């Protein structure tokens, strides 16, 4: 008998160095907002407000902590030396782009933190975690060590949870985590279909691939994760993302598709072999009829989907159907707003749409779905995990006060070299690990 399970969402708490550095070639928003002045305080509060609204609805809402940035160990590994202040000054003078990269608050997008397989899918009946190596972008490739420490600290009990190291670095095994992984199922506690979406086959140069922008995820990486997690072939689908969509700015599958339960909500340009993929999912899904909600280019042109982040929404179960939690930009793009009205009138599986304001994150290409990592947990696993990171009213109050005390409301490129900023970050994070009772996870704490 399937155990009762829920989908818990772990949002990345936006870090104090949130800024716009234009680091992600292929991510349209990141490039178009380069050097805009950011507001880290507002960004963190927007993220917390989203978490609170969902927690108030009864969803299990967790938090993953931000990372230490600027990351001095990375600068040391690149040959900068001296005191922390000297290192920052040297980097700012000779390699400002490198300083920007090691200062990014990009760990907030926890859909890229890891791939997670629930215990009902895995052969050893444990929940499996693999932090994403994020090889495609230097600023993100330095995330997996601390992400792994956080996940191990939260999901510590080895009787229930299994942790793998990130895949070997390098473009052949480029892995972007749950942003390219969707699980479809009947009930959460039943075995599901794990849909891995990749941009490119690494070991075959003649296979279809994008021409303009990089494909960040390879088939070989997805296959490795499936092996590590002990997934069964009958529960697996590997699907290639349409290279034309990557070239239009869809740098992760979660910018063009989102799935939950028996429903896949996707754009007609999402997949290379759409019919085959749908048939594969349909034949593997047990305990429910597969619902494919397809959005055509006539309804929503691909560029509008990218600009609005329609598909980077959270699709959540409610007692009366599914709720689509969309970014505010969806109501600002005419075709998308009209489509949403039509979707609700159509009477399909998606029965409600709600708007969430995460503008600070959106300007770097991160919508509501980028900000969360989904972890399906049965009742025992939920009890076994560290509960200090689950959002309660009290924790929300403590975190908003903490943000108010430690975060700046303005950050520009030149501020990244300010040694005071590094001190502020460390002080804030040291306090945060106390609030969340996580133990020591940062390099400066070890
Ligand atoms: O990896 N942006 C992130 C956005 C990640 C969105 N995540 C998902 N789709 N799941 C990225 O491109 C921009 C940082 C900057 O330019 O300052 C950035 O890293």
Image: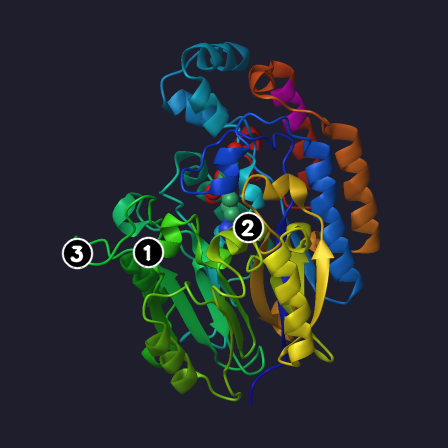
Q: Residues within 10 Å of mark 2 (few under 14, many from 20)?
A: many
Image quadrant in which you'd find residue 43: top right
Q: Which residues are magenta?
A: 421-426
- Is residue 214 rendered to the left or right of residue 414? left
CA gap, disc 3 and disc 1: 15 Å
In the rendered image, residue 252, in percent from the top left (x then y), is placed at 44, 53
Rendered view: 58 above or below 333: below
Asked if residue 314 is among those painted magenta in the image, a careful observer would answer no
Q: Please name which of the two marks, 3 or 1, marks the residue nearer to the observer.
A: 1
Q: Decide if residue 146 is in sight here.
A: no
**Mark 3 in CB contact with mark 1 (< 8 angstroms):** no
Q: Main secondary structure of the magenta part?
A: helix
Q: Which mark is residue 110?
A: 2
**Residue marked by disc 1:** 243
In the rendered image, residue 379, in percent from the top left (x then y), is placed at 65, 74
Q: Residues within 10 Å of mark 3 (few under 14, many from 20)?
A: few
Q: Which mark is residue 204?
A: 3
Q: Nearer the viewer, residue 203 or 277?
A: 277
In the rendered image, residue 202, in percent from the top left (x then y), is placed at 23, 53
Q: Secondary structure at mark 3?
A: loop
Q: Is mark 3 within 8 Å of ligand 1?
A: no
């Amino acid at each position: 008998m399937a155990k009762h399970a829920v989908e818990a969402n772990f949002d990345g708490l936006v870090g104090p160095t949130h800024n716009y550095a234009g680091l992600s070639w292929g991510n349209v928003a990141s490039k178009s907002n380069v050097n805009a002045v950011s507001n880290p305080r507002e960004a963190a509060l927007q993220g917390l407000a989203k978490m609170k609204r969902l927690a108030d609805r009864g969803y299990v809402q967790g938090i993953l902590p931000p990372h230490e940035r600027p990351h001095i160990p990375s600068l040391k590994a690149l040959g900068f030396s001296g005191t922390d202040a000297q290192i920052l000054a040297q980097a700012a003078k000779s390699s400002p782009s490198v300083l920007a990269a090691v200062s990014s608050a990009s760990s907030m997008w926890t859909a890229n933190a890891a791939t997670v397989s629930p215990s009902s899918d895995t052969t050893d009946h444990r929940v499996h975690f693999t932090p994403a190596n994020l090889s495609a972008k230097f600023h993100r490739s330095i995330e997996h060590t601390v992400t792994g420490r956080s996940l191990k600290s939260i999901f510590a009990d080895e009787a229930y949870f299994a942790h793998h190291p990130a895949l070997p670095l390098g473009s052949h095994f480029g892995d972007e985590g749950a942003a390219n992984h969707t699980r479809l199922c009947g009930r959460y506690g039943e075995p599901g279909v794990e849909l891995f979406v990749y941009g490119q086959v690494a070991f075959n140069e003649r296979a279809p691939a994008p021409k303009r922008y990089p494909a960040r995820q390879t088939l070989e990486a997805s296959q490795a994760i499936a092996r590590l997690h002990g997934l069964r072939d009958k529960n697996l689908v590997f699907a290639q993302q349409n290279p034309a969509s990557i070239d239009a700015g869809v740098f992760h599958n979660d910018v063009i598709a989102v799935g939950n339960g028996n429903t896949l909500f996707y754009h007609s340009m999402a997949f290379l072999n759409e019919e085959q993929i749908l048939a594969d999912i349909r034949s593997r899904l047990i305990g429910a009829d597969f619902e494919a909600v397809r959005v055509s280019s006539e309804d929503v042109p691909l560029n509008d989907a990218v600009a609005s982040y329609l598909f980077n929404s959270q699709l959540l179960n409610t007692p009366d159907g599914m709720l689509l939690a969309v970014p505010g930009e969806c109501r600002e793009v005419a075709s998308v707003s009209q489509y949403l009205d039509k979707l609700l009138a159509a009477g399909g599986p998606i029965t409600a749409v709600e708007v969430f304001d995460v503008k600070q994150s959106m300007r770097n290409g991160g919508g509501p779905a980028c900000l969360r990592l989904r972890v399906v947990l049965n009742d025992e696993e939920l009890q076994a995990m560290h509960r200090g990171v689950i959002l309660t009213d009290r924790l929300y109050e403590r975190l908003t006060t903490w943000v108010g005390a430690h975060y700046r409301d303005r950050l520009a490129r030149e501020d990244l070299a300010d040694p005071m900023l590094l001190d502020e970050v460390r002080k804030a994070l040291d306090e945060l690990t106390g609030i969340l009772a996580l133990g020591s996870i940062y390099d400066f704490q070890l």
